[in-house]
Image (cartoon, rainbow, N blue to C red):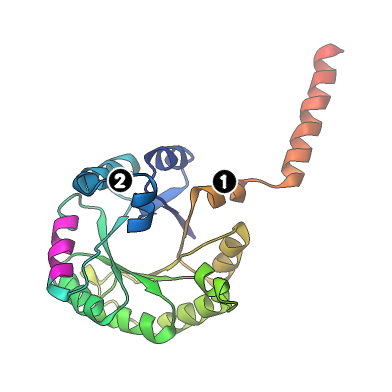
């Protein structure tokens, strides 16, 4: 499984990138607003993220347009920021049409806000390079987000969609709306290609009380050696 960071915070991205485990970044309008981002600064901000993670790491930047031609225009502008920009588009009728057009132009798309197998299949047929089923938002309405993710993974895996995607690349499933390290564990066991996680969850993935306990014991014993 690959790990993307779900954030627009440059400091978080720089720190996670220094760990050597970061394979990409996903952003959205809410995340950009959370850091106090301004509209006129958005292209430069996305470019800075691309520079931090490097050209091999995709960076999803979202269009907020609602009509297909406007989404395509947004997508072309976003893709021009850097070679590793992926255009993020909500799963909706106008989004499908725009995805189909952008894929035909060689621009990769991450279809977001995906909740069902039919949505995922339509996104794949439209030419999406990435499909992002949401987990946590299902949990918010007392449904099983992990079960829905499993269904999407199984359904997409049943078919070869390479003829639809840019350069015939394999569609990758991004487990999104991750709320806990257990979400990551279960998504990995289900076979999701990628988990996009908030920085707080990424830190928790490293932590375990037995690791802390073991480290504390090692340090105490080493202190004994030093004082012997």
Furthest toward the right, the residue is: 228
Disc 1 from disc 2: Cα separation: 24 Å
Give the residue at x 79% y 23%.
222
- Above or below 79: residue 101: below
Is 73 covered by the magenta stretch? yes
Majority secondary structure of the magenta segment?
Answer: helix
Q: Residue 150 in the image: state x and y as whole percent.
A: 53, 78
Q: Residue 203 in the image: state x and y as whole percent.
A: 57, 46
User: Which residues are the magenta region?
Assistant: 70-78
Lateral position of residue 222 relative to residue 48, left or right: right
| Closer to the eye: label 1 or 2 | 2
The residue identified by callout 2 is 37
Q: Quadrant of residue 211?
A: top right
Is 63 covered by the magenta stretch? no
Badge 2 element:
loop
Q: In which quarter of the image is residue 128?
A: bottom left
Q: In which quarter of the image is residue 131?
A: bottom left
């Amino acid at each position: 499984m690959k790990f993307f960071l779900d954030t627009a915070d440059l400091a978080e991205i720089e720190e996670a990138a220094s760990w050597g485990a970061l394979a990409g970044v996903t952003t959205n309008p809410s995340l950009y607003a959370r850091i106090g981002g301004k509209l006129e600064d958005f292209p430069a901000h996305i470019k800075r993220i691309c520079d931090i993670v490097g050209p091999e790491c995709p960076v999803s930047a979202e269009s907020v347009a609602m009509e297909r031609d406007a989404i395509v225009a947004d997508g072309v502008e976003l893709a021009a920021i850097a070679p590793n920009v992926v255009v993020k588009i909500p799963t909706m009728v106008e989004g499908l049409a725009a995805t189909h057009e952008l894929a035909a132009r060689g621009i990769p798309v991450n279809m977001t806000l995906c909740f069902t197998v039919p949505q995922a299949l339509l996104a794949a047929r439209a030419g999406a390079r990435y499909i992002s089923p949401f987990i946590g938002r299902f949990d918010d309405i007392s449904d099983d987000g992990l079960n829905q993710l499993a269904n999407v993974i199984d359904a997409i895996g049943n078919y070869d969609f390479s003829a639809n995607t840019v350069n015939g690349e394999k569609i990758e499933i991004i487990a999104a709306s991750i709320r806990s390290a257990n979400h990551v564990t279960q998504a990995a066991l289900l076979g999701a290609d990628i988990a996009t996680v908030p920085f707080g969850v990424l830190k928790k993935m490293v932590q375990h009380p037995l690791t802390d306990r073991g480290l504390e014991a090692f340090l105490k014993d080493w202190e004994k050696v030093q004082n012997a």
